[in-house]
Amino acid sequence: MRLAILGAGAVGTSVAELAADYGHTVTALADSSSAAVDAGGIDVAGALESKRTDGVVGSASPGDALDGEYDVLVEATPTTLGDAQPGFGHVRTALERDRHVVLANKGPVAERYGDVRELERESDGRVLFEATVGGAIPVLSTIADFDASHITTVRGVLNGTANFILTRMAAEGLDYEHVLAEAQDLGVAEADPTFDVDGTDAALKFVILANVLHGNGREYTLDDADVEGIEDIPGSALDLATEDGRTVRLIGEVTATGEVRVGPRLVPANGTLAVTGTNNIVQFETEHAGRLNVSGRGAGGPETASAVLADVGRLDGD
Amino acid sequence: MRLAILGAGAVGTSVAELAADYGHTVTALADSSSAAVDAGGIDVAGALESKRTDGVVGSASPGDALDGEYDVLVEATPTTLGDAQPGFGHVRTALERDRHVVLANKGPVAERYGDVRELERESDGRVLFEATVGGAIPVLSTIADFDASHITTVRGVLNGTANFILTRMAAEGLDYEHVLAEAQDLGVAEADPTFDVDGTDAALKFVILANVLHGNGREYTLDDADVEGIEDIPGSALDLATEDGRTVRLIGEVTATGEVRVGPRLVPANGTLAVTGTNNIVQFETEHAGRLNVSGRGAGGPETASAVLADVGRLDGD
C-alpha cells in the first residue's frame, strides 16, 4: 500500500521507518510545516535526516502530502480535543477522496466519532484506529473478533505514565511530586504531564472503546466520561494499600450500561490489573467466553507504529 | 453463513447453539453416527434434544452432513494424532468442494499442516483455526495482525487441566495423585487425563503455533516437539519453589530458532506466566512492540465456540 503519513513525531517517524519492512511504500511524510512527497516513494531516511539537521522534512507543504498519491492516510498528528482539528479535517479530505485512513491520533474517534463514521459511510475508504487504544496491544481487533455485542464490560489501565508513577510510589514509598519529577527525568512523563495524570488521556481511550462498543446507539465524547486523576493521591494511601495486599491503579471502565469512568481504584497487588511500570492492560468481560486479558506496552513509537501497520495490513488484505 | 458442524461434543454443540446469535444458519450437525441435515436450517434445539433422549442427532448420516449445503465446514470432531483422521478427510472434502473450513480439531493443523495448506492453495475455500489454540484467547489473530515475521518467540500455558493441578498442588501442599483425583471429581480433568498431564495437548498447540510462525520453511508435527509432562513432579518441589517466591507451570515455547518445547518450569509466583486454575496465557515477544500477553479461559464449549464463530465472522467479512 502507498502511505501518506501526517505527523513526524515518535509514531509517524516509526511508521515511516518500518513501512518498507511490512511491504508498503511511503509516498508522503509531513510534519506541521513541511513535507516530503513523491508518488514513487520518498527517501525516508533522507527526510528524517533533513528534519534533524534542517528542521524541515522536505521542500513540499503538508497540504501537498494530503493531496498527493496514497492508498492510506496515516493520521499521526497530536491529539486535540473539542473539534479534533486539524486531524478531523485530514480524515475528511482523505475519505472524500475515497482513500483509507488509519488513525494514531485519538481526537477524531474520541471527540467526533459520529462525524467520522458518517464520512466513512459515504466513502469507499475505511477508517481503522487500533493504534489509538493501548498501542500494540490487540484491543479493537479483539472486540471485532468477538463482535461488540458479545462484550459486556471493558476495563483496564491505558495510561503508562500514570501507571509508572503509581508503581514507583508504592514500591519506594515516595510522594507523587517526587516520583513525577523522576518520571520526567527518565522521559516517561512529559514536561507537561497534565493529560496523563489527570486521567484525560486514559479517558479518551475509554471513550473510543465506548464508541466502538455502543456507538450504534449513542455517540460518546470526553464530556460523557467521569474522570478523576492521580495528582491528589498521598503516598500514605499507597502504603496503607500495600499493608492490605493491595495497590492503587488508574482504572478506566466502560460499564455494561455504557457509562465511562476513569479514576484511581484499589486492586489486588498481585492481581491481573496491577500491571507494573509503563505497561497497559485491558480486560474484557464477554458474554460466552468469560474474561480475556490483553497486556503489553501501551505506548512508544515502534509499538504504536506496529498497530498502525497491522491496520494497514488489514486494509491490504480486504 | 451456512454452517455444517461435524462433532456434537461440547464445542460443536455450543457452536450450534450460538450460531443464530452471530447471524449464521446451521444447515447440518453431526456426531460420529448420525446427523441432522436441512439446507434451509436445522432445528438445533430439536437435534440436541434428540441426541439427549434418543442418542441420535437426526435421521441423516454424518456423510450427508459433509456432502450437504454449507459455506463453512466447522470441524469439531476429537483431535487424533498421526494421520489426523477422520478430521483431515473432512477438511479435504470441504476444500475440494471449494468450501471454507474452521477447525476446533487440532489434528489436521498439528499433524498434517503441509497437506492442509496444499489443499487450501488449490481451493477457493480457506482454513482458519483460532479455536485450536487457547480457546477464545486471541492468539492466531494477534500473530496475523503483527505478521508472523515480526514475532520472535511465543511461550505460555496452554493446558488448563495441568495448570489447575499445579495451582492446587502449590496452594494446598498436596501431591499430584491427590489433586488429579480432585480435578477428575470436579470435571476439570477427564477420566483419562493422559494427554493433558503428559504435555501432549499443550505440545500440539505449540506445534500449531510453530507451523503458523515458521510454516513457510518447515512443517512441524508432534514428533518435532520436546515434551515433558507434570506427572512426576513431587509436592515437595512445589513447596520448595513457593519458599523461593516461585511456582511451577507447564510452559510451552516456540523459540526464535524454531524449536518447540513443553515442560514444567519454575516461574515467579506472582509473575505474568503464573496464571491460576484452568486459565491459559500466551506471551509474544515481538520485533518492534516488546512483549504482549493474552490470557483467559483456554477451553470450554462456549469459549471455544466463540473462537470458531470469530473465524466464521472473518470469512464472512472477506
Image (cartoon, coloured by chain):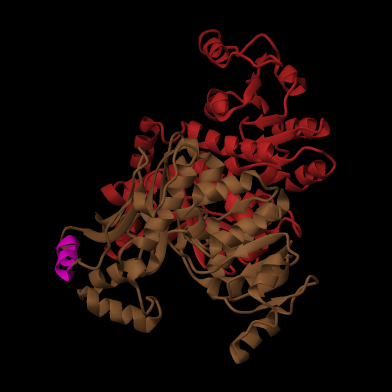
Chain colours: A red, B brown
Q: Is residue A305 magenta?
A: no
Residue B263 seen in the figure: yes
Is the residue A313 above or below the residue B300 in the image?
Answer: above
Residue drawn at x 73%, y 80% as measured from the top left = B43
Could you say which is closer to the camera, residue A173 or residue B198?
B198
In the picture, which quadrant includes the N terminus of chain A?
A: top right
Could you say which is closer to the camera, residue A19 or residue B35?
B35
Judged by its main secondary structure, the magenta piece is: helix
Res B189 → quadrant: bottom left
Residue A318 at what x, y percent from top left? 70, 41
Could you say which is closer to the camera, residue B90 or residue B50?
B90
Q: On the picture, is B280 further left or further right than A224? A: left
Q: Is residue B240 magenta?
A: yes
Residue A167 at what x, y percent from top left? 35, 49
Is the residue A156 above or below the residue A53 in the image?
Answer: below
Which residue range is magenta in the image? B234-242
Residue B282 at what x, y percent from top left? 42, 53
- Marks counted in the figure total 0
Residue drawn at x 30%, y 71% as measured from the top left = B165
Residue A211 seen in the figure: no
Q: Residue furthest bottom?
A: B53
Q: On the picture, is A16 further left or further right than B259? A: right
Residue B24 at what x, y percent from top left? 73, 65
Is the residue B39 above or below the residue A293 in the image?
Answer: below
Res A44 → quadrant: top right
